Image (tube, rainbow, N blue to C red):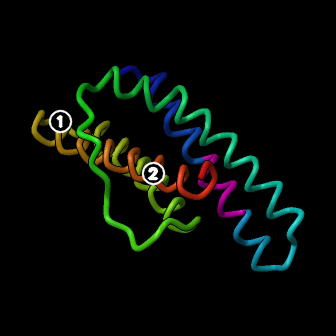
């Protein structure tokens, strides 16, 4: 996988994560306008990930088994968590020297991607 694609995945998923965090903080502060604006920004970034970047990652890394991580129910905090996991597994992939470790990182990266997609679709596209 190219560094450019990894950078795009990291940057966009981190920015989406940040937007949803800002949305939740604003909501907790009672600022619904800022919450909605930040949520829309996060949704726009997620659509870009789903329509473009996630597909490119799958093409670059091979078979996606469509597995997901377990979560209680679809909510924004679970989405934030799964977006953060994307970053963790990209980092693990980059740092891995052994092929077996890279393969584990790829499997978990796909699970994080699939979980993010599933939660996003349940929350915003349902």
Residue 48 lies left or right of residue 119; in this view the side is right
Which of pointers 1 and 2 lies earlier in the amino acid sequence? Answer: 1
Q: CA distance from mark 1 to mark 2?
A: 31 Å
Mark 2, residues whose alpha carbon is within 10 Å: few (<14), some, or many (≥20)?
A: some
Residue topped by disc 1: 97
Question: Which numbered marker is on residue 124?
Answer: none
Secondary structure mainly formed by the magenta segment: helix
Residue depicted at x 12% and y 36%: 98
In the picture provided, is 89 more to the left or to the right than 13?
A: left
Q: Residue at x 31, y 59 (%)?
A: 69
The percent position of residue 42, horizontal first and vertical second, equals 68, 49
Looking at the rendered image, the disc whose residue lies closer to the viewer, 1 or 2, is 2
Asked if the stretch drawn in magenta spans residue 18, the answer is: yes
Outermost residue toward the front?
A: 126
Residue toward you, 69 or 121: 121
Q: Residue at x 65, y 55 (%)?
A: 18
Left or right of 31: which side holds 116? left
Picture quarter with the N terminus? top left
Task: State the extent of the magenta-drawn residues as a range.
Answer: 15-22
Residue 30: percent from the left, percent from the top?
Answer: 85, 79
* Residues marked 1 and 2 touching at CB (< 8 Å): no
Q: Which mark is residue 118?
A: 2
Please, what secondary structure does the residue beneath circle 1 have? loop
Please tell me whether mark 2 sits on a helix, a strand or a loop: helix
Task: Relative to 30, say whether 26 is above or below.
Answer: above
Tell me where residue 46 sits by quadrant. top right
**Is 88 left, or right, of 121 in this rendering?**
left
């Amino acid at each position: 996988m190219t560094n450019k694609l990894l950078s795009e995945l990291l940057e966009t998923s981190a920015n989406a994560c940040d937007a949803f965090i800002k949305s939740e903080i604003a909501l907790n502060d009672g600022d619904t306008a800022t919450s909605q604006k930040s949520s829309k920004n996060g949704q726009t970034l997620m659509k870009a990930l789903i329509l473009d970047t996630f597909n490119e990652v799958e093409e670059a890394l091979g078979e996606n088994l469509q597995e997901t991580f377990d979560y209680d129910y679809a909510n924004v905090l679970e989405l934030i968590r799964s977006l953060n996991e994307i970053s963790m597994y990209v980092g693990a992939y980059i740092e891995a020297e052994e092929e077996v470790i890279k393969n584990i990182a790829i499997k978990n990266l796909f699970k994080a991607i699939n979980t993010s997609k599933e939660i996003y679709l349940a929350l915003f596209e349902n």
